[in-house]
Amino acid sequence: MDNAFMGNILRVNLTTGEILAEELRWDWVDHFIGGAGLATRYLYDELPQGADPLGAENPLIFMTGPLTGTASASASRYSVVAKSPQTGIWGQANSGGSFGPELKRSGYDGIIFSGISPYPVYLQIIDGTAELHDAQPLWGKTVPETEEIIQEAAPQKVTIASIGPAGENLVRYAAIMNNKHRAAGRCGLGAVMGSKKLKAIACAGKQPIRLADERAFREIARHQVELVNESILKVGFDAFGTNMLSDMVNVRGGYPTMNWQRGDFEQIDEVNAQALTDKVFVEGVSCFACPIACGRGTEIKTGKWRGNKGEGPEYETTNTLGAMCGIADMEAITMANYKCNEYGLDTISTGSTIAFAMECYQRGALNLEQTGGLALNFGDADLMVEMVEMIALREGVGDLLAEGTRVMAERIGEGIDHYAMQVKGLELPSYDPRAAKITGLGYVTANRGGDHMTGYIQGPTFLDAPFLIVEESSIRDPFTANPEEAQVLIDMEDALTVFDAIGGCKFMGILLTAEDIVGLISSATGWDFSVADFRLSGERIYNLARVLSAREGVSRSADILPARLTQDPLPAGPAEGMLIESETLEELKDAYYEKRDWDPVLGIPSANKLRQLALDDLIIDVWSSAEQQSL
Ligand code: SF4
């Protein structure tokens, strides 16, 4: 098939053990491309409304995109989609490394898992042949142990995605890990995998990815790699990885510190990019076919954790396991990051949840009796590292933290939800919207909950980085909420949504234009694909995910920020006195819904918009659910 797709998906019924290959729904490919877009369309069709995210009815869908595994710059990614046990709505996570390309070369664009296995299993796919294997001896093993044991038993070199004990123990923010250190981290999809008793997927293959116009594609891809190689982005990322953002965000007063009590960290020099380089950096690490090496190969060289090696921490990890917990110890942050990877935990939610627990303890909402005698003090680095394991194994107070901040706040009560830094159950990443107000709008409109990668409006605000992938990405004054700039967020959301559909890395949105990406898509697939198609596809997929979440109960009233951000001004630092008042947020939402043509009361796409996007078949579904929920 000369269109960059393998043409088949695999269906694995874990209840019965039945495995079937099935041709792709090409009518859906035309509309939703691949990756998270296509997976969301399958999910929409196959997920019953109100299904238990950890039950047999929740499909778990792995999907690559048409560019995954090709020679274009940084086309390594695969997406995983399911109903999230953390948020209860559309859950999506994606990851780089080499698992996506290997899945595709094993013969399939994606896999849909349904049901629940009666005992732990793993799926092995080699050159089109798929088999379930007994994973009972692997249950309880960490991610590296799992990868090593599966590799030893495999007839050839395989690439593996797996869960650690956190996924098995249904920690609500468990990750799916691949290549040992890479995480499809957000939304707790590792717990969905654990609920299905699916320990791992191992892939290998030599199936060719045939392109419609191989020569044209190679020429475009070569030119883009040259562009990337000459860019300042590459220089910065190669030298410092994503942690180069630390100083940039801190200097604007948006670096969450002590569970967002402050937006600047006095000890930033201990945890910034230079500190990471000096203390733990060994070498840059790239994803498949990427000319940039933004991953950090690291080793702890001194102290009690000396000799431990791995990858990371990334920027958000450094902040959430560091300043957010009041910790300025790069070695402890690195060790906690390694443990998150080994146990299979999302580092953002892990660090944020520990920070929240520390604030609960500080305020007396959690006492020593509840913590099992642990004094959860901000700044205690050893405790923070220990907590990672306790969460993954649900030991002691770790069992409570394994539920994430939203559920913790509900259980603790006493108004502590004011300090639970989450949106729709997803813990917020490391950019304080009080220091850049449009980012607050981005957190509430992101389809998977409080997330930065959906629209990455943090780029134009905190980093002053223009994104060439949209026509206009500048934000005039981050301290001022300008409803007109909701359009910038919308354009960013739609454009970056296409990256999740094609299998590309969103960092390329800084350097490449829509014309560049369209050139790749057209030559790879043979489609007559224009810039208008690019923008329409992003918008269509974005609306589809919103409709899916609306079916699960999301409406305008769910698009809110934690009260701390709307009521408590930052007490000091470059953004001293700033907050994002609820009224301001509501004005931004009004503008956003209007520009999206979403109902201003319900916050769901109008019937007219759905028709324009060729999503007519969703109209009755979404509007009848919305009416039922508003009765
Ligand atoms: S820029 Fe970084 S995250 Fe993106 S593909 Fe390259 S190495 Fe991976």
Image (cartoon, rainbow, N blue to C red):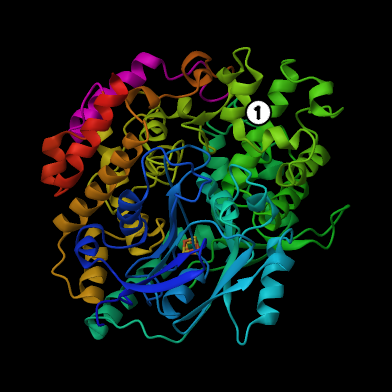
Q: Residue at x 69, y 39 (%)?
A: 322
Query: Which residue position is annotated with label 1?
Result: 356
Q: Residue at x 27, y 28 (%)?
A: 626
Q: Quadrant of the C terminus?
A: top left
Residue 308 in view in this figure: yes
Q: Quadrant of residue 599?
A: top left
Which sits in the foreground, 415 or 114?
Answer: 114
From the top left corner, tell me how far across and down residue 566 is, in percent.
46, 17
Q: Quadrant of the N terminus?
A: bottom left
Would you place residue 121 above or below residue 327 in this image? below
Magenta stretch, residue numbers = 573-601
Q: Is residue 503 left or right of residue 524?
A: right
Q: Is residue 116 magenta?
A: no
From the top left corner, tell me how far across and down residue 54 is, in percent.
53, 46
Which sits in the foreground, 232 or 86?
Answer: 86
Q: Quadrant of residue 628?
A: top left
From the top left corner, tell me how far across and down residue 261 is, in percent.
62, 22
Q: Residue at x 88, y 52 (%)?
A: 304
Would you place residue 17 above or below residue 451 in this image? below
Q: Is residue 379 left or right of residue 75?
A: right
Which sits in the foreground, 596 or 109?
Answer: 109
Q: Amino acid at mark 1?
A: Phe
Q: Residues within 10 Å of mark 1 (few under 14, many from 20)?
A: many
Which sits in the foreground, 417 or 301?
Answer: 417
Q: Secondary structure at mark 1?
A: helix
Q: Would you say the beta carbon of the disc 1 residue lies within 8 angstroms of ligand 1?
A: no
Q: Is residue 599 magenta?
A: yes
Q: Residue at x 43, y 20 (%)?
A: 580
Total numbered badges shown on the rendered structure: 1
From the top left corner, tell me how far across and down residue 500 is, in percent.
37, 57
